[in-house]
Image (cartoon, rainbow, N blue to C red):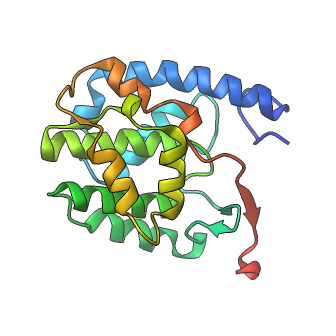
Amino acid sequence: MALENKLNITDSAELARTEEKISKTKAVELFESGILNDLTAGSFNALAEIHRFLFDDIYEFAGKIRTVNIAKGSFRFAPVMYLEIALKHIEEMPQSTFDEIVEKYVEMNIAHPFREGNGRSTRIWLDCILKKELNMVVDWSLVDKDDYLLAMERSPIKDIEIKFLLKNALTNKINEREIYMKGIDASYHYEGYSVYRTSEL
């Protein structure tokens, strides 16, 4: 079953294709509009605005904190009942060094604040922080997708792998659209979320 959407698409594969096409078009608009430069890098509001911009044409929940608990395989993202507290904590985390920025990124991934589209939105959010604090961004074309997904799965326990991958892909080409767009690739994001009840915790 496809997620409920504004386009009334009921086939999940069709929705995935349409979502990727629309979100990539919106990502280009977001980059070229200059809006990213006006956001407070590292804040949840910045992430919510990125998500809203990318997915507002597709989902009613664009830019809004999820109201269901979600899991990927056996890993359960932050429960809804603790989500707002977690987001406040993440927002307050330091972000002055590369290690601090990636640690903040990992925590935001664990929070997974939206029902869908977390990966793409959070990678743009990460690049906004890196750009502001270090004058660098990630060249996602240098990051192997399988290595990235495995490193992100392990990152809640050990973040050394994701730090290594991202550090080796840093570039000072912060204003190149092609580099920015590599992070929007849907194949980098977690797919197949399941929803569970709080009573199943």
Residue drawn 44% across the image and 25% down it: 27
User: Which x, y percent locates residue 99?
Assistant: 23, 60
User: Which x, y percent locates residue 169?
Assistant: 30, 38
Residue 20 or residue 5, whichever sits in front: 20
> In what quadrant of the picture does the N terminus appear?
top right
Question: Does 191 appear above or below 34?
Answer: below
Instruction: Describe residue 123's horizontal placement relative to residue 6 as left or right.
Output: left
Instruction: Describe residue 170's horizontal placement relative to residue 172 as left or right.
Output: right
Instruction: Describe residue 161's horizontal placement relative to residue 118 as left or right.
Output: left
> In what quadrant of the picture does the C terminus appear?
bottom right
Residue 193 or residue 44, whichever sits in front: 193
Residue 138: quadrant of the picture: top left
Residue drawn 26% across the image and 67% down it: 93
Residue 96: quadrant of the picture: bottom left
Residue drawn 22% across the image and 44% down it: 130
Residue 148 or residue 101, whichever sits in front: 148
User: Which x, y percent locates residue 44?
Assistant: 37, 54
User: Which x, y percent locates residue 42?
Assistant: 28, 52
Whether residue 68 is visible, yes or no, is no
Question: Does 115 appear above or below 74?
Answer: above
Residue drawn 14% across the image and 44% down it: 134
Question: Does 4 appear above or below 156?
Answer: above
Whether residue 53 is visible, yes or no, is yes
